[in-house]
Amino acid sequence: MSQSTSAELHTDPTQFPGVDVYAVAGNPISHSKSPAIHARFAEQSKQKMHYGRLQPEIGEFKAAATSFFAAGGKGMNVTVPFKLDAQAMADALTLRAQLAGAVNTLRMEDGKIFGDNTDGAGLVRDLLAQGIQIQGSRILLLGAGGASRGVLGPLLEQSPQELIIANRSNAKADELVQLFGGLAKSLNVSLRAMTLSALEDAAKAGIFFDLVINATAAGLSNESPISDTVASNIFVPQSFAYDMVYGKVTTFMQQALHRGARVSDGLGMLVEQAADAFLIWRGAKLADAIDSRAVLAELRTS
Ligand code: NDP
C-alpha cells in the first residue's frame, strides 16, 4: 500500500490544527462517498471542518476510535462492519440507537462519546422526498439484518397500515417482531414476520404492496431475495420498490420495473443519513443551510 493511500485511510486530527475533524470508519472504506457528501454540506453551510476516512483492522475499531477522539476528533460515522462495536463503545445512546441495536454516528462532547443511528430517519426522508406516502401504506421489508432493524422504528412511526418482514431465515425476523411489536401496537400498525419461502406461497394467493424495501445484502452479489414469481405477484404499477444498495439497477429493481412499478436505489438514504449526522455535529440551526437533494443530484451526475 502506498504512503498516500495509507494516509487517506487514517485520519489524524492532529494534522488539521484549528479545524474540527470528522471521519467515516469502516473496513473497507476507500469506496465511501461520505467524505464527498460531508465536504459539500460543509461548503453549503460555510463550516470549517475536515472529514476523512478511517480503516481500522477488524477487531481494532475501539482502539482506533479511542485514539481518534483522544487526538481531538469531534465525530465519526460508522459503517460495515463496526456499527455494533460503535454501539458498545458509546458512553450514552439515543433511544433510536438503542432500538436500532447499532450506531452509525458518534459525537464527542465534554469528554463523553454519544451514539446515535440516523439510517432510519435517512430512509424515511428519502422516501418522503420522492413523494412516497408511508402513512396508511402496506409495506414489505425484505431482510432482517442490521439495516432492517435500524429502519423499523422510523418506518413504524410513519403509521403504515401493515408491515411484513420477510427474511431467508426465520429466527431473525421473528426477533424483530418481538422487539418492535410494542411500538407497532401503540401505533396501530399490523406487524408480522414470514420467511422468504412462506412469501412464495402468500404471493401465489395474491398479495401486493405499496412499498417493498430490499434491506438484504443480496443486491451486492447481483441476486434478488425474491423469485420472479413472487415479484410478479407483489408488484403492481402503483408499487414503489426501494433497494438499499446503491450505484446500480439491481435485479430486484429490474423485477419491479418489469411490473411497471417505480424504483429507487439507496443513494438518497445515504445522503439523508449523512445530513442528519452533519446536523447532530454542527447544530440543527444549519438545517436550512444544507441542501441534501442538491448533493444527491450532484452525486448522481458525478
Ligand atoms: P446484515 O449482514 O446485517 O444483514 C443481511 C441481510 O440480508 C440478512 O437479513 C440476510 O438474511 C439477508 N441476505 C443476505 N444475502 C441474501 C440473499 N442472497 N438472499 C436473501 N437474503 C439475503 O447487513 P445489513 O442489514 O447491515 O445491510 C443490508 C444491505 O443494506 C447491505 O447491502 C448494505 O449495503 C445496505 N445498506 C445501505 C444503507 C444506505 O445508506 N443506503 C445503509 C445501511 C445498509 P439471513 O438473516 O437469512 O442471513
Image: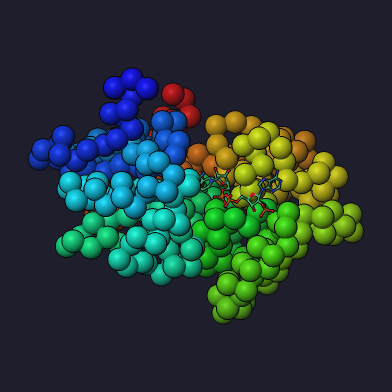
Q: Nearer the viewer, residue 209 or 115?
A: 115
- x, y percentage for residue 173? 67, 63
Work out which residue is located at the far left of the displayed protein and give it. Answer: 18
Tell me if residue 65 can be seen: yes
Which residue is at 82% across, 48% downward? 230
Q: Is residue 204 above or below residue 260?
A: below
Q: How is the image coloured?
A: rainbow
Q: Quadrant of the C terminus?
A: top left
Residue extending farthest top: 2
Q: Does residue 294 appear in this view?
A: no
- Number of residue marks: 0
Left or right of 55, for residue 173: right
Residue under the point 48% across and 63% down: 101
Q: Quadrant of the N terminus?
A: top left
Q: Quadrant of residue 52?
A: top left
- Does 246 sit above or below residue 61? above
Q: Give how far across and how far down residue 30 sits, in percent.
A: 41, 31
- Compared across the picture, whether 154 is left or right of 238 comes to left
**Residue 41: x and y, percent?**
30, 40
Measured from the top left, where is residue 158 in percent x and y? 54, 65
214 is higher (above) or lower (below) than 260: below
Question: In the figure, is residue 15 to the left or right of 184?
Answer: left
Vertical placement of residue 85 versus 231, above or below: below
For the residue pair 38 and 195, the one nearer the viewer reads as: 195
Residue 297, by quadrant, is: top left
Q: Residue shown at 66%/42% (left/top)?
A: 218
Residue at 29% of width from left, 22% of height from top? Answer: 3
Q: Nearer the viewer, residue 53 or 185?
A: 53
